[in-house]
Image: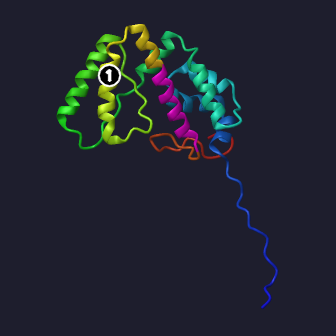
Amino acid sequence: MTRGPTLPAHRLPSLPKPLDAFNTAPADEARALLLHCLHSLRWSHRITDHRPYPDLDSLLAAADEAAYDLSPADLSEALARESLPELPEGTYSAAHMALGAAHAAYEARFGHVFVLYLGDTPPDESLDRILEAIRSRLTNDPEEERVVAAEELRRLAGGRLAACLRNTGRNPSGASLITQVGPP
């Protein structure tokens, strides 16, 4: 049995990648996306001003490197916009109270919210990890803790930025940030 000629492969039009849209977006829109992820105006401006980025890893590396140049005021601005880590559903009220007390002690000692990058920590282990980290970091002197908090902030910001631009073009709240090449 002979078959007829094979049809050429049908190609779908190439869809814009979120990073392409970010690279070509107007500066104020790119800064808004970055401010949502990085929580610092200076940090956002610096990353926007150095576009285009060839790939997501380059953008993340630039964001990480730029974080090292943040002034104490820039770092304070970014820390002030951070929120407390969320506890998994079903966490007992006693655990919420313990975490609230630990956060209060931390903020009283260091003057800013506690930040911790949980990465791939399973939800059922996050409370223990947060409490352990707060207890451990309460022993730091203020300058040492500022360095640790800055590192955790860099990791948090990088995770948010990657989530915003990795294949989806959506911010963590689900609202579309980038929908086409050019202005989002």
What is the x, y in percent for residue 141?
37, 8
Number of callouts = 1
Image quadrant for the C terminus? top right
What is the x, y in percent for residue 175?
49, 43
Q: Residue furthest bottom?
A: 1
* Left or right: 136 in relation to 161: left
Q: Main secondary structure of the magenta part?
A: helix
What is the x, y in percent for residue 89?
27, 43
Look at the image and say whether residue 162 sits in the magenta stretch: yes
Q: Quadrant of residue 130?
A: top left
Specify the amino acid type for callout 1. Ile
Q: Residue furthest left?
A: 94
Residue 104 at least partly seen:
yes
Residue 121's place in the image compared with 136, above or below, is: below
Badge 1 crowding class, 10 Å Cα cut-off, few under 14, some 14 to 19, many 20 or more, is some
Residue at figure coordinates x 47%, y 20% from the top left:
78
What is the x, y in percent for residue 59?
63, 31
Residue 28 at least partly seen:
no
Q: Quadrant of residue 45?
A: top right
Region rendered in magenta: 151-166
Residue at figure coordinates x 35%, y 31% from the top left:
85
Front one among 176 and 91: 91
Identify residue for label 1.
134
* Left or right: 153 in relation to 5: left
Residue at figure coordinates x 79%, y 77% from the top left:
6
Image quadrant for the N terminus? bottom right
Residue 91's place in the image compared with 114, above or below, is: below
Look at the image and say whether residue 123 sits in the magenta stretch: no
What secondary structure is found at the residue carrying circle 1?
A: helix
Residue 113's place in the image compared with 126, above or below, is: above
